[in-house]
Image (tube, helix red, strand yellow):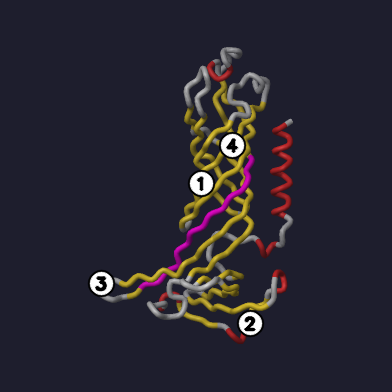
Amino acid sequence: MKTIRFLSAIILFILAVSCAPLDEFYSHEFSSGFYKLKDPGTNPEKVFVSLYEDSIVVYPVSGEGKSLKPEISKSRGIDISSINPGSYLYNNSFIRTSLDIDLSTVLLKYRPATPNVSSQLSTNVNGILYAGFRKDYFRMKTRVSPLSSVQTSVRHTGFDFGLFAGIGVTPVNPTVTMLRSIQEYDGIVFQKGFSIFATYENMSVGVAVGFDNLIGKDRNIWIYNQKPWIGLVLGIANF
């Protein structure tokens, strides 16, 4: 019953996210759209960004919510590669808050020890569908070499948190069934829980706390049924 309730909550959460306006979904890349522009020492301001290859144009915006509109007459543009100390956007950050749906995998699962079985670390094949809330930071990072040459690039960091659900594989044997089953096989589990991700450039990794339910005839004698585990998760694809 708890599994059904949790699965229903995950489905409702994903459906709620999926029903959001399409312009609230973003890839993890720096792209044209609405952001908050943060200049060190000042409060963030809402802006609209247009990217053209190596150049960036920033528009202040007016209105609120869905009525936000770029003020075209007040735009400011610059080549990213020419952002120098003291110039426009130097060390500035563009901040984006969005909804996120990802396909991920749990690389490692740590299961705490039970009275009769030592703690376990598993690396079985699995996949999870993750839905949550995300915040991305795109900072204009300028480096000055010892020869006084200047190079500016966009550094991407971010984090997000949310719920996940998916299917995985786990060993089933006499040890994990308290000798109540003599069979040894790879069982299928329904896994669910919550996770927190951190992103740097194109790499997205996180920590998850989850619960598994074995699918099949041995589900009631499996010692890890509905017991918490801690895992290392890796983002695979963004929708």
Quarter assignment of residue 194: top right
Q: Which mark is residue 206?
A: 1
Mark 4 nearby-residue class (10 Å; few <14, some 14–19, many ≥20): many
N-term-proximal mark, 4 vs 2: 2
Q: Disc 3 residue type?
A: Pro
Residue 5 in the image: state x and y as whole percent: 73, 37
Most common secondary structure along the magenta stretch: strand
Q: Disc 1 residue type?
A: Gly
Residue bounds of the magenta highlight: 151-165
Magenta highlight on residue 135: no
Residue on which disc 3 sits:
146
Alpha carbons under labels 3 and 4: distance apart? 49 Å
Q: Disc 4 residue type?
A: Gly
Q: Which mark is residue 21?
A: none
Q: What secondary structure is found at the residue carrying circle 1? A: strand
Residue on which disc 4 sits:
210
Q: What secondary structure is found at the residue carrying circle 2? A: loop
Alpha carbons under labels 1 and 4: distance apart? 13 Å
Residue 62 in the image: state x and y as whole percent: 66, 78
Position of the C terminus, as image quadrant, is: bottom right
Q: What secondary structure is found at the residue carrying circle 4? A: strand
State the residue at coordinates (46%, 80%): 88
